[in-house]
Image: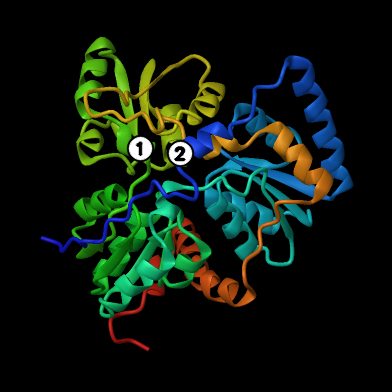
Amino acid sequence: MSNVSIIDVEYEQPACPTKHAWARVPVEPTPSQRTELKERIRHLLKERNAVMVSHYYVHPDLQDLAVETGGIVSDSLEMARFGRDHPAQTLVVSGVRFMGETAKILSPEKTVLMPDLDANCSLDLGCPIDAFSAFCDQHPDRTVVVYANTSAAVKARSDWLVTSSCALDIVRALKDKGHKILWAPDKHLGGYIQRETGADMLMWTGSCIVHDEFKAIELELLKKEHPKAKVLVHPESPADVVALADAVGSTSGILKAAREMDAPEFIVATDNGMMHMLRQQNPDKLFIEAPTAGNSATCKSCAHCPWMAMNGLAGVARVLETVANRIEVDAALIDRARIPIDRMLAFTAAHRAGQDAGALVPNIGAA
């Protein structure tokens, strides 16, 4: 049985509460405004030698326009990796702040812009660097593994960075080499990894406001209404929700499962921004949002991240015109934060190539 940390930082921070984020959600443009904004952005992207990178959870307009203009829609790490490898000298990141920081860490020489710098993440807000660093100092015997949904400063304090698509493989490799792990910040993802790998993991107890609100009791009732539906769950969800899943995976994992599983209907427990890509890729299948309703619902998110919702076409056009909302990360912090990112990239590249990725993990006590 693992130890569990007593650290529990509330994500509802005074500087950026969810009510503030919801109040900043852009007004939906009219059809003529949408057309005009898209044309203006296309022109500005060429003029600025810029490319758009959008997360799966942002507005469909931003997903579609990124693809239409030669950018990408993906998870946070692939967004950053794409931006690093693209010849454009300006990256417009539609997502939340840690995604912009990660893009800057991998492309320090490039200009990284975001539609709204107040777009944040409950996992990032709930893991402030001073408290986290003190927590790490209390457990110097543990290898520090942090999730991508963290600030540049937290990444710089870690030994390894992981995403939800590679976390199991990396933690399993660390366990096999005798490492005891200090994990942050998502307690549900950490618990899932611990159950799957049996690793000794000391947990920070943050959570994602979107995935934390899915309800197992309501999900069971919805499954009865849709007996042919398969359930797709992101591992940031509570354990009793994960237990009901037919497939558990990252955003890319959920997309893959929806394409490959032979089912006419799917109930999806992740941010409902994913529905756009799921429906585009599988027009003949039905996708239903997993329920956040129930007696314990708070509806701080209702299956959509309020900070993701702050991204809009007008914001993209504005930052391209003014070159405002630049992401800046201290150079010394970039150097340190890049170490755990590069370790992850090397590990995943070796894994994809069929090589012994575990060989990249040092044994305890090894130089």
Q: Is residue 224 left or right of residue 88?
A: left
| Amino acid at circle 2 | Thr
Rendered location of residue 323, percent (x, y): 79, 51
Question: Which residue sits at x=18%, y=58%?
Answer: 198
Q: Quadrant of residue 288?
A: top left
Residue 355 vs residue 305, the one in the foreground: 305
Rendered location of residue 306, percent (x, y): 49, 35
| Amino acid at circle 1 | His
Instruction: Specify the quadrant that holds the C terminus.
Output: bottom left
Q: Is residue 226 above or below residue 119?
A: above
- The residue under label 1 is 211
Q: Which of marks 2 and 1 is in front?
A: 2
The disc at residue 18 is 2
Name which of mark 2 and mark 1 comes first in the sequence. Answer: 2
Q: In this view, does 356 lie above or below 273?
A: below
Q: Is residue 134 left or right of residue 100?
A: left
Q: Is mark 2 on a helix, strand or loop?
A: helix
Residue 328 vs residue 228, the one in the foreground: 328
